[in-house]
Image (cartoon, rainbow, N blue to C red):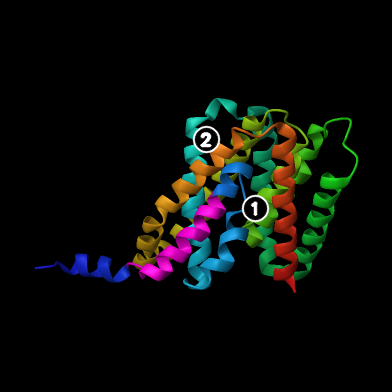
């Protein structure tokens, strides 16, 4: 005779149609994450919104992003640039606290629109403009880390800000990927802890749905990793800039 717990878990499972739709979206999203180290929320959220309440999407992606980023870091920890992490993480923390405060006192739409135009302009310049002759100064870690933290706290999407800085600083593709993944890991862990404290993860159906989507996340990450192994630095930076441009366009659409 089935137990009440078994019945609860069974009823919490998504329908096959919803699961397939979400799985396809997450394979694509984590393929991009596996290459660029960010972008899952911007890619997956519009599709997930067809099958999940919007309030469940960000907490669910926080868990999956943290798992994906942690796996990336554990397997390739030595590739991370610890110098850049020491510069970016404190600024990211300050930015996250500032973003949480701004969210309570400002209209985020205006700030989001300004960021979207900046991101689009930067990405277009990086794709078609003249190639820089020198690296970005490490002093830029403070503004980039702070702004990334602000927008991670306010909109759950600041990874492309870190990517702009890291692609202008680091030469090795693997170092860029793992350093970016480490930053995203810390950022998503902070969000997940806040959701846990707020009781969001007491939602059993959302947790069950998250577990059923782990294979899609793993497959997307594996595909992204395989593709990255065959990319030169120039190709990798171009892919990242294309994702940054797509992120900017998505932000512009969202801010209207």
Q: Secondary structure at mark 1?
A: helix
- Residue 116 x %, y %: 77, 61
Q: 7 or 185, which is in the foreground? A: 7
The residue sitting at the left extreme is 1
Within 10 Å of disc 1 (Cα), the crowding (few <14, some 14-19, many 20+) is: many
- Residue 167 x %, y %: 74, 37
Magenta stretch: dominant SS?
helix
User: Where is residue 19, by image quadrant?
Assistant: bottom left
Camera sees residue 71: yes
Q: Whole-Å distance between the Cαs marked 2 and 1?
A: 22 Å
Does residue 140 sit above or below 49 in this rendering?
above
Q: Earlier in the sequence, mark 2 or mark 1?
A: 2
Q: How many marks?
A: 2
Does residue 145 sit above or below 139 in this rendering?
below
Does the stretch in magenta take in 15? yes
- Give the residue displayed 88% in from the left and 35% down from the top: 132
Along the horizontal axis of the image, is 104 left or right of 5? right
Range drawn in magenta: 13-30
Q: 181 or 106, which is in the foreground? A: 181
Q: Give the position of the C terminus as an image quadrant.
A: bottom right
Pointer 2: what residue? 73
Does residue 176 sit above or below 59 in this rendering?
above
Pointer 1: what residue? 96
Does the stretch in magenta take in 189? no
Q: Secondary structure at mark 2?
A: helix
Within 10 Å of disc 2 (Cα), the crowding (few <14, some 14-19, many 20+) is: many
User: Where is residue 15, by image quadrant?
Assistant: bottom left
Along the horizontal axis of the image, is 107 left or right of 209? right
Q: 218 or 20, which is in the foreground? A: 20
């Amino acid at each position: 005779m089935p137990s009440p717990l078994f019945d609860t878990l069974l009823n919490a499972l998504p329908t096959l149609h919803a699961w397939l739709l979400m799985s396809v979206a997450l394979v694509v999203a984590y393929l991009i994450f596996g290459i660029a180290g960010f972008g899952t929320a911007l890619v997956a959220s519009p599709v997930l919104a067809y099958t999940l309440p919007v309030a469940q999407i960000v907490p669910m992606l926080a868990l999956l992003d943290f798992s994906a980023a942690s796996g990336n870091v554990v397997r390739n920890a030595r590739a991370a640039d610890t110098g850049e992490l020491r510069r970016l993480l404190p600024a990211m923390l300050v930015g996250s606290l500032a973003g949480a405060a701004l969210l309570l006192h400002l209209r985020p739409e205006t700030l989001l629109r300004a960021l979207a135009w900046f991101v689009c302009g930067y990405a277009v310049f990086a794709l078609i403009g003249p190639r820089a002759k020198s690296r970005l100064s490490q002093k830029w870690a403070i503004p980039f880390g702070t702004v990334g933290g602000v927008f991670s706290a306010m909109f759950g999407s600041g990874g492309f800000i870190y990517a702009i800085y890291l692609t202008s600083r680091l030469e090795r593709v693997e170092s860029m990927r793992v350093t970016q993944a480490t930053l995203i890991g810390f950022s998503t862990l902070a969000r997940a802890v806040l959701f846990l404290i707020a009781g969001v993860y007491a939602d059993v159906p959302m947790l069950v749905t998250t577990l059923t989507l782990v294979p899609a996340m793993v497959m997307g990450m594996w595909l992204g990793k395989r593709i990255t192994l065959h990319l030169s630095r120039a190709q990798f930076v171009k892919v990242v800039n294309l994702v940054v441009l797509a992120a900017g366009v998505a932000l512009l659409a969202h801010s209207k």
